[in-house]
Amino acid sequence: MTATERIRGRLLIDGQWRDAERFEPNRSPSDLSDVVGDYAWASMEQAREAMAAARRAQAHWGRSNPQMRTDILRRTGDGILARIDALSVLLAREEGKTLKDARGEVARAAQIFHYYAGEPTRGRGGFLPGLREGFNIIVDHEPLGVVSLITPWNFPIAVPAWKIAAALAYGNAVVFKPSEVTPGCAVALVEILLEAGLPADVMNLVMGSGAELGSVLIDEADGVSFTGSTPTGRWILERAAKNMVKVQLELGGKSPLVVLDDADLDLAVQVAYEGAVPQTGQRCTTASRLIVTRGLHDAFVEKLAQRVAAVRVGHALDPQSEIGPVATEAQLAKDLSYVDIGRQEGAELLCGGERLERPTAGYYMSPALFANSTNDMRINREEVFGPVAAIIKVEDLDEAIAVAADSDFGLSSAICTRSLTAAEKFRRGSSSGMVVVNASTSGAEYHVPFGGRGVSGFGAPEQGSATSEFFTEVKTTYINHGIA
Ligand code: NDP
């Protein structure tokens, strides 16, 4: 695949690649003249067909030999690695993250498939003696059934990978609805799954508008695993309640990073930068509230502002770029509007927050850093999902813990300190699903649970074997064998 090749991406329904009445071009946010491909948009009828096909496929896949599932998942990971160069270019062109970040994400997707390749053979059943004389009890985990996997644009290979790999490992049939912004990565991933030997009817790919297809994807599924914004997650939860469809929601964040007076200044600045700026701030775990105690505050502000102001914003495929463009026009408008909101609220804009011109027309913006902000400002309460961070000055650890926890969101939180006692006090006081000490709020690993509290998440966590809680159903069998 080269940067000039134009892809025509089709739907996968009931084992067949299908055209649709509507195809939409997908442009690179780094260069709006670069059309990545044209992608089919599924109709409601096609989404219904996909759901029905997955239902039929689940009957054989749910009972398939675990070794077969293991082999397919392992070969998928191998297939991703074999194409890492092309996939990284595709991802960087389509989403706008730098080639280096794209490569890291593709490699991570392969690791995820390799991890879940072990799951079919691990099993998680139990055998217990009954409490009644002559009884045994088997506790079994069966596949949930047909799962709709709905994903956002910001990690267009890794997020689908961690949902698809887990769904298939535990014997579920899939209907996959990627973001309309990043269909190219979705098609490429599905192609690799089929090459790895996945029976094509087990994996159904419907692209297009989530708002349009959502009702079918929810009403006709046994479970919905969704990653995206909190408002969409709330809508899915309400809709799923009608038929009592199981849901797993990974939603937005407003993650705090606390920096205490005793922190290593250089490390704290690096941790804040890594949390707030890379991938153009478009991570659910982005550190957007930087809560700093008085003693280190001024030095931290000065050094971080220098680092953020110096960031090189450019084309995703340019090796000089440290961050690429914002992924979409709507997201850019939202990011810039929050810069205005921050100013109007009285926060001090230290640097950035401006639209940038580059040799190619794209959605470029300089990362914005605010100081003298308070936790009740909208820039500190609402998720921006862009390169906009704000510093909040506090007196001490207790105030820092209180401010960090004062949020509707609860995804990730971090602290920089040399004190083990302070770190433990922060860990206990944190209201988020993930806590990090002396490192960035981002950087989750695939073998341990990933999930948020409050409006950041709902249902079983993702990743690791913890996600089996969502992708399987428990069955308890009592056997009266009659031996006293
Ligand atoms: P959205 O919530 O807008 O969309 C996510 C997915 O849901 C897309 O595939 C979208 O389709 C689909 N969708 C939209 N409306 C509906 C609906 N009514 N029913 C079913 N599906 C629907 O989020 P973005 O794609 O804009 O991603 C950014 C957001 O995702 C941020 O808020 C971010 O915090 C969050 N996020 C959370 C993560 C986490 O793990 N906690 C990880 C990554 C991102 P379409 O493309 O057509 O709009």
Image: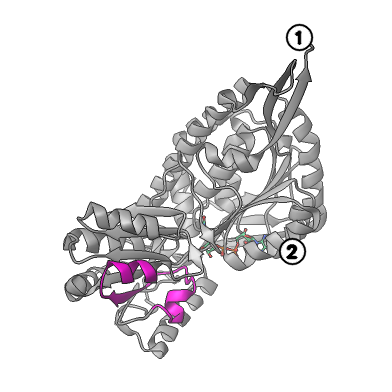
Which corner quadrant of the image does residue 474 belong to? top right
Q: Percent from the top left, x then y, of residue 84? A: 44, 40
Question: In percent of the image, x 31 and y 68: which residue is there?
Answer: 398
Q: Residues within 10 Å of mark 1 (few under 14, many from 20)?
A: few
Which corner quadrant of the image does residue 98 belong to? bottom left
Asked if residue 29 shows in the view, the reply is yes
Say whether mark 1 is within 8 Å of ligand 1. Answer: no
The residue indicated by pointer 1 is 483
Where the C terminus falls, by quadrant?
Answer: top right
- Residue nearest the observer in this picture, 303 or 36: 303
The kind of residue on which mark 2 rests is: Glu
The residue indicated by pointer 2 is 212
- Residue nearest the observer in this picture, 452 or 138: 138
Q: Percent from the top left, x then y, of residue 104? A: 39, 46
Q: Which residues are magenta?
A: 375-402
Of label 2 and label 1, which has the lower sequence position?
2
Kindly state the secondary structure of the residue where label 2 is placed.
Answer: helix
- Residue nearest the observer in this picture, 41 or 282: 282
Q: Is 242 placed left or right of 355 in the picture?
A: right
Question: In percent of the image, x 26 and y 59: which residue is there?
Answer: 416
Question: In percent of the image, x 50 and y 65: which residue is there?
Answer: 409
Toward the top, the furthest residue is 483
What whole-number distance in Å separates the C-alpha atoms at marks 2 and 1?
A: 58 Å
Say whether mark 2 is within 8 Å of ligand 1. Answer: yes
Q: Percent from the top left, x then y, of residue 142? A: 70, 32
Q: Nearer the viewer, mark 2 or mark 1?
A: 1
